[in-house]
Image (tube, rainbow, N blue to C red):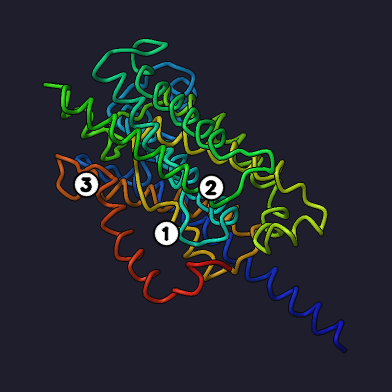
Amino acid sequence: MVEQEVQEQHRKKLLRWTVALVSLVVALFAAAIFAICIGSVSIPVDRVFQSLISSDFWRVITGGHATGTDNIIVLEIRLPRILVAGLVGASLSVAGVAMQALFRNPMASPYILGLSSGGAFGAAVAIVLGFSLVSGQFAIPLMAFIFTFLTLFMVYGISRTKFGVPVTTLLLAGIAVGAFFSALVSLIKYFSGDKLSDIVFWMMGGLWNSNWSLFWMALPFVLVGCIILLLLAREMNLLMLGESQATNLGVNVKQIRFIILIASALVTAAAVSVSGVIGFVGLIIPHTLRIIMGPDNKILLPASIVGGAVFMIVTDTIARTIISPQELPVGIITALVGAPFFLYLLRSRKREIWGW
């Protein structure tokens, strides 16, 4: 009798997960099509689908150019921006899940270790000083990516002791390094002259420079990072029980923690490099889906990937249409949504904030 009840509960849980995940995928496609349709020039759904199945589609994604007004707007302007938005949302959201599991705290986010400050410094160096390993449109994204990753290694190196890497020390080192890079960014801004507006706009977070080249640049890093984190879902579940319990259950805590940090930094760096600093995505989406689906990372990770993509596509669509033909940085929209949610989290879930 007990076994039957357990099986029934398991079946219901799988059904709930399946329905939720399918709903998120449907919402993703609906949001993408809706975002393609609206803008300063509205395009009906049937013409959008005609563009997506036209021969121009394959020509454009391989570096060519579209023909016809509809195809140019859909394939060269809106579609790559929507795809980049989806990558950024998925990256920040899945990194948020990983950080929250690693620190066992729902207040953790992808930027908790100062990664955004490091990325901002790299971008500021490229914008103001003109220093980068490459030239052209990849100059700023590459420097942001490199410094985001370097920040992780700095934080990890500072935190490391002969006994391992304590989570508390890791967090405090991240705060200190992040503050250091923020100070350097402020210093560069002070002497930036007419380049100040470029730094400010980059730090606000926006997707107006999105194109197919940036999408293909970010895609491999996002895929690799997401796959690694998905494969570590079981280990994340065990880490949420505590380090000693995870060790007793056969988890190599030091090794797994390092891999999670690397994978999280990889997807975060990819997101920061193409969009600038966009906050609250890694906090809002994982926590919302955790309320709906529960804390099991086996479903929370894939759901957050899709949910983060939906959220970013919707918020970016609002950002570029709310004051059309001008547009707002999408980071402003996510902050306007995320800050009240953050306050709600503080008020309603005080016990969870200090540990699970």
Q: Secondary structure at mark 1?
A: helix
The quarter of the picture where residue 19 lies is: bottom right
CA neighbours of label 3 inside 10 A, class few (<14), some (14 to 19), many (20+): some
- Calculate the distance from the C-alpha at mark 1 to the C-alpha at mark 3: 22 Å
* Residue 29 vs residue 269, the one in the foreground: 269
Across and down, in percent, residue 165 comes to 62, 44
- Calculate the distance from the C-alpha at mark 2 to the C-alpha at mark 3: 43 Å
For mark 1, what is the residue? 284
* Residue 239 vs residue 65, the one in the foreground: 239
Where the N terminus falls, by quadrant?
Answer: bottom right
Q: Amino acid at mark 3?
A: Thr
Across and down, in percent, residue 287 comes to 48, 63
Q: Amino acid at mark 1?
A: Ile
Residue 248 appears left or right of 150: right
What residue is shown at x 33% (from left), y 59% (from top)? Answer: 338
What residue is shown at x 21% (from left), y 47% (from top)? Answer: 321
For mark 3, what is the residue? 321
What residue is shown at x 57% (from left), y 65% (from top)? Answer: 20
For mark 2, what is the residue? 169
Dot 1 or dot 2: first in sequence order is 2
Q: Residue 267, which numbered label?
A: none
Residue 120 appears left or right of 232: left
Across and down, in percent, residue 344 comes to 35, 71
* Residue 267 vs residue 178, the one in the foreground: 178
Residue 255 appears left or right of 301: right
Q: Secondary structure at mark 2?
A: helix
